[in-house]
Image (cartoon, grey):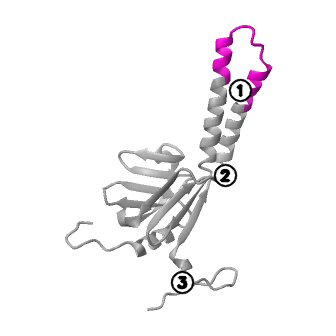
């Protein structure tokens, strides 16, 4: 049986081998505002350390400088890590990489996936914010923006959710690569 091979938008043919991998992304440009806030805290901490008179009240000044620099670094790197997410699904696994460095990263073998579902609306509010989230009642998620996402039901009963553009095609691709359940195994 031959597999339909779609045309590339640039007019070239795509090989059947290339269609075995699905990739998608999601971005959140609003995170840049939070990153700028972190940068401002960092700059204020450095300026306070350099420009202040260290003659009196040194304990309060040290705590202020260290606090501002720590908060600035945490906010800056925490938001830069979740500016975007890249999702790759191949015949063996789903891999999620966050930010420009690709950390945090999560790889889920498709052999551990029972089913995949399309979620039309995933919000940071339902997960407690942006980023890599865990809630005991609903599972683990990587949420970088409000919108559509993929929800995986894993063999151990847990769920994993990721926000990604064109999540419906990701779900179709995952379902095409899932192995049928063993006879007598409840789905």
Could you give the CA–CA distance between mark 2 and mark 1, rounded to whole angstroms?
26 Å
Query: Which of the marked residues, 1 or 3, is nearer the chain's N terminus?
Result: 3
Residue 172 sits in which quadrant? bottom left
Mark 2 vs 3, N-terminal side:
3
Comes first in the chain, label 2 or label 1:
2
Is residue 52 positioned above or below 141 on the image?
A: above
The residue that label 3 is drawn on is 16
Furthest residue toward right: 51
Q: Counting other residues with Cα less than 10 Å from the Cα at mark 3, is it few (<14), some (14-19), or many (20 or more)?
A: few
At a point 69% along the width and 31% down the height, the residue shown is: 41
Is residue 22 positioned above or below 121 on the image? below
Distance of mark 1 from mark 3, alpha carbons? Answer: 55 Å
Q: Is residue 140 visible?
A: yes
* Element at label 1: helix
- Whether the residues at callouts 2 and 3 have beta carbons within 8 Å, the answer is no
Q: Are marks 1 and 3 in contact (CB under 8 Å)?
A: no
What's the mark number on residue 29? 2
Q: Which residues are magenta?
A: 43-65
Q: Is residue 113 visible?
A: no
Distance from disc 2 to disc 3, alpha carbons, whole Å, reads 34 Å
The answer to whether residue 49 is left or right of residue 99 is: right
Q: Nearer the viewer, residue 127 or 175?
A: 175
| Residue with the most extreme left position | 184
- Secondary element at image label 3: loop
- Secondary structure mostly seen in the magenta stretch: helix
Task: Give the residue pinned by disc 1.
Answer: 45
- Residue occupying the point 36% across, 45% down: 136
Residue 46: within the magenta?
yes
Look at 42% across and 50% down and name the residue there: 140
The residue shown at (31%, 56%) is 157
User: Which quadrant of the rendered structure holds the N terminus?
Assistant: bottom left
Residue 130, disc:
none
């Amino acid at each position: 049986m031959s597999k339909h091979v779609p045309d590339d938008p640039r007019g070239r043919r795509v090989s059947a081998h290339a269609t075995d991998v699905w990739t998608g992304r999601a971005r959140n440009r609003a995170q840049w505002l939070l990153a700028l806030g972190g940068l401002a805290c960092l700059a204020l901490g450095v300026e306070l350390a350099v420009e202040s008179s260290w003659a009196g009240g040194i304990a309060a000044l040290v705590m202020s400088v260290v606090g501002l620099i720590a908060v600035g670094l945490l906010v800056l790197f925490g938001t830069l890590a979740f500016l975007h997410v890249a999702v790759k699904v191949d015949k063996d696994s789903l891999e999620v990489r966050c930010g420009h460095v690709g950390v945090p990263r999560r790889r889920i073998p498709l052999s551990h996936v029972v089913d995949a579902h399309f979620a039309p609306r995933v919000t940071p509010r339902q997960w407690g914010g942006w980023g890599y989230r865990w809630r005991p009642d609903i599972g683990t998620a990587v949420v970088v923006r409000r919108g559509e996402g993929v929800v995986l039901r894993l063999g151990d009963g847990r769920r994993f959710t990721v926000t990604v553009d064109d999540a419906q095609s990701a779900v179709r691709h995952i379902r095409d690569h899932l192995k049928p359940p063993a006879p007598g195994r409840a789905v």
